[in-house]
Amino acid sequence: MNELWKRLFGAYLNTIWAVDTRALGRPHAILVRVVRLLHGVLREVMQGDLTLRAMSLVYTTLLSLVPLLAVSFSVLKALGVHNQIEPLLFNFFEPMGDKGLELGQRIFGFVENVKVGVLGSLGLVFLFYTVVSLVQKVEEAFNYVWHIKRPRRLVRRFSDYMSVILVGPVLVVSALGITATVMGTDIVRSMGEVEPLATLLPVLSKLVPYFLICAAFTFVFIFLPNTKVHFTSALVGGLVSGVLWQTAGMGFAAFVANSTKYTAIYSGFAILVIFLIWLYVSWLVLLLGAQVAYFHQHPQLLSVRREDGHLSNWAKERLAMLAMLLIGYYYYHNRGLWTDDALAARLGVPPAALVAVLDILEMNGFVNRTADDPPAYFPGRDMETISLQDLLLAVRRGEESAVITAGSAVPPPVDEMMTRVEGAIHDALGERTVKDMVLSYSETETAEQVREA
Protein backbone atom coordinates (compact mmCIF):
# COMPACT_ATOMS: atom_id res chain seq x y z
CA MET A 1 0.00 0.00 0.00
CA ASN A 2 2.87 2.37 0.76
CA GLU A 3 4.41 1.74 -2.64
CA LEU A 4 1.04 2.28 -4.36
CA TRP A 5 0.49 5.51 -2.44
CA LYS A 6 3.94 6.78 -3.44
CA ARG A 7 3.21 6.05 -7.09
CA LEU A 8 -0.17 7.79 -6.96
CA PHE A 9 1.30 10.80 -5.19
CA GLY A 10 4.15 10.96 -7.70
CA ALA A 11 1.68 10.85 -10.58
CA TYR A 12 -0.31 13.64 -8.92
CA LEU A 13 2.80 15.80 -8.55
CA ASN A 14 3.77 15.24 -12.18
CA THR A 15 0.25 15.98 -13.41
CA ILE A 16 -0.39 19.09 -11.32
CA TRP A 17 2.93 20.65 -10.33
CA ALA A 18 5.48 19.57 -12.93
CA VAL A 19 3.42 20.79 -15.90
CA ASP A 20 3.76 24.25 -17.47
CA THR A 21 0.25 25.71 -17.66
CA ARG A 22 1.31 28.03 -20.49
CA ALA A 23 1.72 24.98 -22.77
CA LEU A 24 -1.78 23.67 -21.99
CA GLY A 25 -5.12 24.46 -23.53
CA ARG A 26 -7.25 27.03 -21.71
CA PRO A 27 -9.73 24.56 -20.07
CA HIS A 28 -6.92 22.21 -19.01
CA ALA A 29 -4.82 25.12 -17.66
CA ILE A 30 -7.76 26.48 -15.65
CA LEU A 31 -8.40 23.01 -14.17
CA VAL A 32 -4.75 22.65 -13.15
CA ARG A 33 -4.74 26.12 -11.54
CA VAL A 34 -7.93 25.35 -9.62
CA VAL A 35 -6.51 22.06 -8.31
CA ARG A 36 -3.28 23.83 -7.30
CA LEU A 37 -5.29 26.51 -5.48
CA LEU A 38 -7.38 23.92 -3.64
CA HIS A 39 -4.21 22.04 -2.72
CA GLY A 40 -2.61 25.21 -1.33
CA VAL A 41 -5.67 26.19 0.72
CA LEU A 42 -6.09 22.66 2.09
CA ARG A 43 -2.40 22.59 3.03
CA GLU A 44 -2.80 25.83 5.00
CA VAL A 45 -5.87 24.47 6.80
CA MET A 46 -4.14 21.20 7.67
CA GLN A 47 -1.20 23.17 9.05
CA GLY A 48 -3.57 24.37 11.78
CA ASP A 49 -2.76 28.09 11.97
CA LEU A 50 -5.95 29.21 10.22
CA THR A 51 -8.10 27.21 12.63
CA LEU A 52 -6.25 28.73 15.59
CA ARG A 53 -6.83 32.22 14.19
CA ALA A 54 -10.52 31.45 13.73
CA MET A 55 -10.79 30.25 17.35
CA SER A 56 -9.10 33.40 18.67
CA LEU A 57 -11.55 35.52 16.67
CA VAL A 58 -14.45 33.64 18.29
CA TYR A 59 -13.23 34.73 21.72
CA THR A 60 -12.76 38.34 20.58
CA THR A 61 -16.21 38.33 18.98
CA LEU A 62 -17.87 37.25 22.22
CA LEU A 63 -16.34 40.26 23.97
CA SER A 64 -16.99 42.71 21.16
CA LEU A 65 -20.34 41.67 19.67
CA VAL A 66 -22.65 43.76 21.86
CA PRO A 67 -20.37 46.88 21.83
CA LEU A 68 -19.99 46.60 18.04
CA LEU A 69 -23.75 46.39 17.49
CA ALA A 70 -24.31 49.19 20.02
CA VAL A 71 -21.99 51.57 18.18
CA SER A 72 -23.38 50.62 14.75
CA PHE A 73 -27.00 50.90 15.88
CA SER A 74 -26.30 54.27 17.49
CA VAL A 75 -25.13 55.60 14.13
CA LEU A 76 -28.10 54.08 12.31
CA LYS A 77 -30.59 55.32 14.93
CA ALA A 78 -29.32 58.84 14.35
CA LEU A 79 -30.31 58.38 10.71
CA GLY A 80 -33.58 56.64 11.59
CA VAL A 81 -32.81 53.50 9.57
CA HIS A 82 -31.66 51.03 12.26
CA ASN A 83 -34.69 48.76 11.74
CA GLN A 84 -33.65 47.99 8.17
CA ILE A 85 -30.49 46.14 9.17
CA GLU A 86 -32.06 43.89 11.80
CA PRO A 87 -33.40 41.32 9.24
CA LEU A 88 -29.92 41.07 7.70
CA LEU A 89 -28.32 40.41 11.09
CA PHE A 90 -31.04 37.93 12.03
CA ASN A 91 -30.06 36.07 8.87
CA PHE A 92 -26.74 35.30 10.61
CA PHE A 93 -28.56 33.51 13.44
CA GLU A 94 -30.97 31.69 11.14
CA PRO A 95 -28.82 28.52 10.70
CA MET A 96 -29.12 27.94 14.47
CA GLY A 97 -32.91 27.50 14.17
CA ASP A 98 -35.54 28.92 16.50
CA LYS A 99 -33.14 29.05 19.42
CA GLY A 100 -30.74 31.07 17.30
CA LEU A 101 -33.43 33.64 16.48
CA GLU A 102 -34.28 33.79 20.17
CA LEU A 103 -30.61 34.37 20.98
CA GLY A 104 -30.50 37.12 18.36
CA GLN A 105 -33.51 38.83 19.95
CA ARG A 106 -31.80 38.73 23.34
CA ILE A 107 -28.60 40.21 21.94
CA PHE A 108 -30.57 43.01 20.30
CA GLY A 109 -32.32 43.54 23.61
CA PHE A 110 -28.92 44.03 25.24
CA VAL A 111 -27.95 46.43 22.46
CA GLU A 112 -31.08 48.54 22.92
CA ASN A 113 -30.40 48.76 26.65
CA VAL A 114 -26.90 50.11 26.04
CA LYS A 115 -27.28 53.88 26.08
CA VAL A 116 -24.13 55.35 24.65
CA GLY A 117 -25.04 58.83 25.87
CA VAL A 118 -24.98 57.89 29.57
CA LEU A 119 -21.82 55.77 29.57
CA GLY A 120 -19.56 58.68 30.39
CA SER A 121 -16.18 59.46 28.84
CA LEU A 122 -14.38 56.43 30.27
CA GLY A 123 -17.20 54.05 29.35
CA LEU A 124 -17.38 55.44 25.82
CA VAL A 125 -13.62 55.04 25.36
CA PHE A 126 -13.81 51.44 26.61
CA LEU A 127 -16.74 50.77 24.27
CA PHE A 128 -14.83 51.99 21.24
CA TYR A 129 -11.65 50.19 22.35
CA THR A 130 -13.53 46.89 22.52
CA VAL A 131 -14.89 47.42 19.01
CA VAL A 132 -11.52 48.51 17.60
CA SER A 133 -9.83 45.46 19.14
CA LEU A 134 -12.10 43.19 17.10
CA VAL A 135 -11.24 44.96 13.83
CA GLN A 136 -7.55 44.88 14.77
CA LYS A 137 -7.69 41.13 15.44
CA VAL A 138 -9.33 40.57 12.06
CA GLU A 139 -6.64 42.67 10.37
CA GLU A 140 -3.91 40.67 12.12
CA ALA A 141 -5.48 37.42 10.90
CA PHE A 142 -5.65 38.74 7.34
CA ASN A 143 -2.08 40.05 7.52
CA TYR A 144 -1.02 36.56 8.59
CA VAL A 145 -2.75 35.06 5.55
CA TRP A 146 -1.08 37.64 3.29
CA HIS A 147 2.37 37.19 4.93
CA ILE A 148 2.35 40.83 6.07
CA LYS A 149 4.40 41.56 9.19
CA ARG A 150 3.93 45.33 9.31
CA PRO A 151 0.59 46.59 10.67
CA ARG A 152 -1.00 49.82 9.53
CA ARG A 153 0.43 53.06 10.80
CA LEU A 154 -1.30 54.28 13.95
CA VAL A 155 -2.97 57.30 12.30
CA ARG A 156 -4.20 55.31 9.31
CA ARG A 157 -5.32 52.47 11.59
CA PHE A 158 -7.55 54.85 13.55
CA SER A 159 -9.10 56.43 10.45
CA ASP A 160 -9.64 53.12 8.66
CA TYR A 161 -11.15 51.39 11.68
CA MET A 162 -13.52 54.28 12.31
CA SER A 163 -14.57 54.08 8.66
CA VAL A 164 -15.43 50.41 9.03
CA ILE A 165 -17.25 50.88 12.33
CA LEU A 166 -19.17 54.06 11.55
CA VAL A 167 -19.54 54.21 7.76
CA GLY A 168 -19.82 50.47 7.06
CA PRO A 169 -23.33 50.01 8.54
CA VAL A 170 -24.57 53.09 6.64
CA LEU A 171 -23.29 51.66 3.35
CA VAL A 172 -24.96 48.29 4.04
CA VAL A 173 -28.30 49.95 4.79
CA SER A 174 -27.93 52.15 1.70
CA ALA A 175 -27.30 49.10 -0.48
CA LEU A 176 -30.36 47.37 0.96
CA GLY A 177 -32.47 50.50 0.46
CA ILE A 178 -31.34 50.99 -3.14
CA THR A 179 -32.02 47.33 -3.92
CA ALA A 180 -35.51 47.50 -2.42
CA THR A 181 -36.25 50.74 -4.27
CA VAL A 182 -35.12 49.37 -7.61
CA MET A 183 -37.11 46.16 -7.17
CA GLY A 184 -40.23 48.20 -6.30
CA THR A 185 -40.19 50.59 -9.25
CA ASP A 186 -42.93 50.56 -11.87
CA ILE A 187 -40.42 49.66 -14.58
CA VAL A 188 -39.30 46.51 -12.74
CA ARG A 189 -42.91 45.55 -11.98
CA SER A 190 -43.88 45.98 -15.62
CA MET A 191 -40.88 43.91 -16.67
CA GLY A 192 -42.08 41.20 -14.29
CA GLU A 193 -45.19 40.72 -16.41
CA VAL A 194 -43.19 39.65 -19.46
CA GLU A 195 -41.62 36.23 -19.89
CA PRO A 196 -38.92 35.13 -19.27
CA LEU A 197 -38.40 38.08 -16.89
CA ALA A 198 -41.49 37.07 -14.94
CA THR A 199 -39.70 33.85 -14.03
CA LEU A 200 -36.24 35.34 -13.58
CA LEU A 201 -37.08 38.31 -11.35
CA PRO A 202 -38.31 36.26 -8.35
CA VAL A 203 -35.16 34.16 -8.60
CA LEU A 204 -32.97 37.27 -8.82
CA SER A 205 -34.72 38.84 -5.83
CA LYS A 206 -33.86 35.74 -3.79
CA LEU A 207 -30.25 35.93 -4.96
CA VAL A 208 -29.84 39.55 -3.84
CA PRO A 209 -28.78 38.57 -0.27
CA TYR A 210 -26.14 36.25 -1.73
CA PHE A 211 -24.80 39.05 -3.92
CA LEU A 212 -24.67 41.41 -0.92
CA ILE A 213 -22.80 38.83 1.18
CA CYS A 214 -20.25 38.21 -1.59
CA ALA A 215 -19.87 41.98 -2.07
CA ALA A 216 -19.33 42.45 1.68
CA PHE A 217 -16.68 39.72 1.75
CA THR A 218 -15.00 41.24 -1.31
CA PHE A 219 -14.88 44.64 0.39
CA VAL A 220 -13.35 43.11 3.52
CA PHE A 221 -10.66 41.30 1.50
CA ILE A 222 -9.71 44.54 -0.27
CA PHE A 223 -9.82 46.82 2.74
CA LEU A 224 -8.47 44.96 5.77
CA PRO A 225 -5.11 43.42 4.69
CA ASN A 226 -2.29 45.95 4.95
CA THR A 227 -1.34 45.47 1.31
CA LYS A 228 -2.76 46.16 -2.12
CA VAL A 229 -5.24 43.43 -3.01
CA HIS A 230 -6.34 43.25 -6.63
CA PHE A 231 -10.08 43.54 -7.15
CA THR A 232 -10.25 40.32 -9.20
CA SER A 233 -8.51 38.31 -6.47
CA ALA A 234 -10.72 39.82 -3.76
CA LEU A 235 -13.80 39.07 -5.87
CA VAL A 236 -12.77 35.42 -6.32
CA GLY A 237 -12.21 35.13 -2.58
CA GLY A 238 -15.53 36.88 -1.90
CA LEU A 239 -17.45 34.54 -4.18
CA VAL A 240 -15.83 31.48 -2.62
CA SER A 241 -16.54 32.75 0.90
CA GLY A 242 -20.11 33.67 0.01
CA VAL A 243 -20.88 30.26 -1.47
CA LEU A 244 -19.13 28.45 1.39
CA TRP A 245 -20.95 30.55 4.00
CA GLN A 246 -24.38 29.87 2.50
CA THR A 247 -23.57 26.17 2.08
CA ALA A 248 -22.23 25.96 5.63
CA GLY A 249 -25.40 27.70 6.83
CA MET A 250 -27.63 25.08 5.25
CA GLY A 251 -25.47 22.26 6.60
CA PHE A 252 -25.36 23.84 10.04
CA ALA A 253 -29.15 24.23 10.07
CA ALA A 254 -29.48 20.49 9.36
CA PHE A 255 -26.95 19.80 12.12
CA VAL A 256 -28.89 21.89 14.64
CA ALA A 257 -32.17 20.23 13.69
CA ASN A 258 -30.64 16.84 14.55
CA SER A 259 -28.66 17.94 17.61
CA THR A 260 -31.01 16.68 20.28
CA LYS A 261 -28.06 15.04 22.04
CA TYR A 262 -26.44 18.43 22.58
CA THR A 263 -29.64 19.69 24.21
CA ALA A 264 -29.76 16.63 26.44
CA ILE A 265 -26.12 17.02 27.49
CA TYR A 266 -25.77 20.80 27.80
CA SER A 267 -29.40 21.65 28.61
CA GLY A 268 -29.80 25.44 28.66
CA PHE A 269 -26.19 25.95 27.54
CA ALA A 270 -26.74 24.05 24.28
CA ILE A 271 -27.59 27.20 22.31
CA LEU A 272 -24.40 28.87 23.59
CA VAL A 273 -22.29 25.90 22.45
CA ILE A 274 -24.02 25.91 19.06
CA PHE A 275 -23.49 29.68 18.79
CA LEU A 276 -19.74 29.26 19.46
CA ILE A 277 -19.49 26.55 16.80
CA TRP A 278 -21.33 28.73 14.26
CA LEU A 279 -19.04 31.69 15.03
CA TYR A 280 -16.01 29.45 14.50
CA VAL A 281 -17.35 28.15 11.18
CA SER A 282 -18.13 31.69 10.00
CA TRP A 283 -14.65 33.02 10.81
CA LEU A 284 -12.99 29.97 9.27
CA VAL A 285 -14.97 30.51 6.05
CA LEU A 286 -13.85 34.15 5.98
CA LEU A 287 -10.19 33.19 6.45
CA LEU A 288 -10.47 30.51 3.78
CA GLY A 289 -11.76 33.14 1.35
CA ALA A 290 -8.82 35.38 2.25
CA GLN A 291 -6.45 32.47 1.58
CA VAL A 292 -8.07 31.88 -1.81
CA ALA A 293 -7.66 35.59 -2.66
CA TYR A 294 -3.99 35.46 -1.63
CA PHE A 295 -3.15 32.44 -3.76
CA HIS A 296 -5.16 33.84 -6.68
CA GLN A 297 -3.06 37.00 -6.58
CA HIS A 298 0.22 35.11 -6.01
CA PRO A 299 -0.15 31.81 -7.91
CA GLN A 300 3.64 31.45 -8.10
CA LEU A 301 3.66 30.89 -4.31
CA LEU A 302 1.25 27.95 -4.32
CA SER A 303 4.13 25.51 -4.22
CA VAL A 304 5.88 27.44 -1.43
CA ARG A 305 5.13 26.45 2.14
CA ARG A 306 4.89 29.18 4.75
CA GLU A 307 8.01 27.92 6.48
CA ASP A 308 9.86 28.07 3.16
CA GLY A 309 9.92 31.87 3.52
CA HIS A 310 12.92 31.50 5.86
CA LEU A 311 15.94 31.85 3.60
CA SER A 312 19.46 30.59 4.02
CA ASN A 313 22.24 33.13 4.43
CA TRP A 314 23.33 32.54 0.83
CA ALA A 315 19.79 33.17 -0.43
CA LYS A 316 19.51 36.35 1.67
CA GLU A 317 22.78 37.69 0.25
CA ARG A 318 21.66 36.96 -3.30
CA LEU A 319 18.21 38.45 -2.73
CA ALA A 320 19.70 41.60 -1.16
CA MET A 321 21.92 42.13 -4.21
CA LEU A 322 18.97 41.64 -6.59
CA ALA A 323 16.71 43.96 -4.61
CA MET A 324 19.39 46.65 -4.35
CA LEU A 325 20.09 46.36 -8.07
CA LEU A 326 16.48 46.87 -9.12
CA ILE A 327 15.79 49.60 -6.54
CA GLY A 328 18.96 51.45 -7.56
CA TYR A 329 18.44 50.94 -11.30
CA TYR A 330 14.88 52.25 -11.36
CA TYR A 331 15.77 55.18 -9.10
CA TYR A 332 18.83 56.11 -11.16
CA HIS A 333 16.88 56.07 -14.45
CA ASN A 334 13.78 57.79 -12.97
CA ARG A 335 11.55 54.81 -13.74
CA GLY A 336 9.65 54.89 -10.46
CA LEU A 337 10.01 53.19 -7.09
CA TRP A 338 9.44 49.59 -6.09
CA THR A 339 6.97 48.44 -3.44
CA ASP A 340 7.71 45.19 -1.62
CA ASP A 341 4.79 43.40 -3.32
CA ALA A 342 5.85 44.50 -6.80
CA LEU A 343 9.47 43.61 -6.11
CA ALA A 344 8.54 40.19 -4.72
CA ALA A 345 6.43 39.47 -7.81
CA ARG A 346 9.29 40.58 -10.11
CA LEU A 347 11.82 38.37 -8.35
CA GLY A 348 9.41 35.46 -7.78
CA VAL A 349 10.05 35.16 -4.04
CA PRO A 350 7.70 35.04 -1.03
CA PRO A 351 6.88 38.61 0.09
CA ALA A 352 7.67 37.80 3.74
CA ALA A 353 11.21 36.68 2.82
CA LEU A 354 11.82 39.83 0.78
CA VAL A 355 10.51 42.11 3.56
CA ALA A 356 12.94 40.52 6.02
CA VAL A 357 15.85 41.36 3.69
CA LEU A 358 14.55 44.88 3.00
CA ASP A 359 14.33 45.47 6.75
CA ILE A 360 18.03 44.63 7.09
CA LEU A 361 18.90 47.00 4.23
CA GLU A 362 16.81 49.76 5.77
CA MET A 363 18.28 49.22 9.24
CA ASN A 364 21.79 49.69 7.80
CA GLY A 365 20.82 52.80 5.82
CA PHE A 366 21.11 51.28 2.35
CA VAL A 367 17.44 51.94 1.48
CA ASN A 368 14.68 54.17 2.81
CA ARG A 369 10.91 53.92 2.66
CA THR A 370 8.43 56.54 1.52
CA ALA A 371 5.53 57.56 3.76
CA ASP A 372 3.04 56.09 1.28
CA ASP A 373 0.84 53.15 2.09
CA PRO A 374 2.10 50.70 0.94
CA PRO A 375 5.58 52.22 1.12
CA ALA A 376 8.00 52.29 -1.80
CA TYR A 377 11.79 51.95 -1.54
CA PHE A 378 14.65 54.13 -2.77
CA PRO A 379 18.41 54.22 -2.05
CA GLY A 380 19.18 55.50 1.44
CA ARG A 381 22.22 57.47 0.29
CA ASP A 382 24.31 58.15 -2.79
CA MET A 383 24.84 54.83 -4.53
CA GLU A 384 28.51 55.73 -5.10
CA THR A 385 29.03 55.51 -1.35
CA ILE A 386 27.37 52.09 -0.90
CA SER A 387 30.06 49.47 -1.41
CA LEU A 388 28.96 45.97 -2.34
CA GLN A 389 31.26 44.61 0.35
CA ASP A 390 29.47 46.60 3.07
CA LEU A 391 26.11 45.53 1.63
CA LEU A 392 27.06 41.86 1.67
CA LEU A 393 28.54 41.93 5.17
CA ALA A 394 25.50 43.80 6.54
CA VAL A 395 23.18 41.06 5.26
CA ARG A 396 25.44 38.33 6.62
CA ARG A 397 25.42 39.96 10.05
CA GLY A 398 21.85 41.19 9.89
CA GLU A 399 20.48 38.89 12.57
CA GLU A 400 23.59 38.10 14.57
CA SER A 401 23.05 37.96 18.29
CA ALA A 402 25.05 40.16 20.63
CA VAL A 403 24.72 37.48 23.32
CA ILE A 404 26.61 35.00 21.15
CA THR A 405 29.25 37.30 19.70
CA ALA A 406 30.11 39.60 22.56
CA GLY A 407 32.79 38.22 24.85
CA SER A 408 32.91 34.85 23.11
CA ALA A 409 36.29 33.12 23.17
CA VAL A 410 37.14 32.41 19.51
CA PRO A 411 39.94 29.87 18.97
CA PRO A 412 42.75 31.25 16.77
CA PRO A 413 42.18 28.79 13.88
CA VAL A 414 38.52 29.82 13.60
CA ASP A 415 39.34 33.52 13.90
CA GLU A 416 42.04 33.17 11.24
CA MET A 417 39.68 31.32 8.89
CA MET A 418 36.92 33.93 9.23
CA THR A 419 39.45 36.71 8.60
CA ARG A 420 40.53 34.94 5.40
CA VAL A 421 36.88 34.62 4.29
CA GLU A 422 36.30 38.35 4.75
CA GLY A 423 39.56 39.04 2.94
CA ALA A 424 38.41 36.89 0.03
CA ILE A 425 35.16 38.89 -0.14
CA HIS A 426 37.15 42.11 -0.23
CA ASP A 427 39.42 40.78 -3.00
CA ALA A 428 36.40 39.63 -5.05
CA LEU A 429 34.37 42.84 -4.75
CA GLY A 430 37.16 45.36 -4.37
CA GLU A 431 35.86 48.92 -4.29
CA ARG A 432 32.79 48.21 -6.43
CA THR A 433 29.68 50.10 -5.42
CA VAL A 434 25.98 49.77 -6.02
CA LYS A 435 26.26 52.42 -8.74
CA ASP A 436 28.82 50.28 -10.56
CA MET A 437 26.39 47.35 -10.42
CA VAL A 438 23.51 49.53 -11.65
CA LEU A 439 25.52 50.91 -14.58
CA SER A 440 26.60 47.43 -15.63
CA TYR A 441 22.99 46.20 -15.67
CA SER A 442 21.48 46.14 -19.15
CA GLU A 443 18.01 47.62 -19.46
CA THR A 444 17.03 44.83 -21.88
CA GLU A 445 17.61 42.04 -19.36
CA THR A 446 14.51 40.08 -18.47
CA ALA A 447 13.19 39.20 -15.02
CA GLU A 448 14.39 35.61 -15.54
CA GLN A 449 17.91 36.83 -16.23
CA VAL A 450 17.82 38.97 -13.11
CA ARG A 451 16.79 35.98 -10.99
CA GLU A 452 19.63 33.94 -12.46
CA ALA A 453 22.22 36.68 -11.89
Image: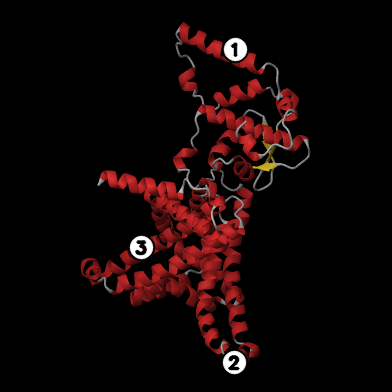
Which amino acid type is shown beneath numbered disc 3? Leu
Q: Is residue 48 visible?
A: no
- Asked where in the image residue 177 lies, by quadrant, the reply is bottom right
- SS for dot 3: helix
Residue at position x 28%, y 67% from top? 269
Residue at position x 61%, y 89% from top? 191
Q: Position of residue 304 (x, y in %)?
A: 48, 43
Q: Which mark is residue 388?
A: none
**Marks 1 and 3: CB-CB under 8 Å?**
no
Left-right relation of 61 to 381? left
Question: Relative to the observer, which residue lies in front, 329 or 62?
Answer: 329
Q: Position of residue 333 (x, y in %)?
A: 78, 37
Q: Mark 3 highlights which residue?
A: 276
Q: Of the residues under marks 3 and 2, which one precedes in the sequence? A: 2
Which amino acid type is shown beneath numbered disc 2? Val
Q: Mark 2 highlights which residue?
A: 194
3D distance between C-alphas at marks 1 and 2: 86 Å
**Quarter of the image with the C terminus in it:** top right
Q: Mark 1 highlights which residue?
A: 423
Question: Relative to the observer, which residue lies in front, 308 or 251?
Answer: 308
Q: Please say if 292 is above or below 252.
A: above
Residue at position x 31%, y 69% from top? 271
Binning the other alpha carbons within 10 Å of mark 2 as few (below 14), some (14 to 19) or many (20 upward) gives few
Question: Relative to the observer, which residue lies in front, 30 or 151?
Answer: 30
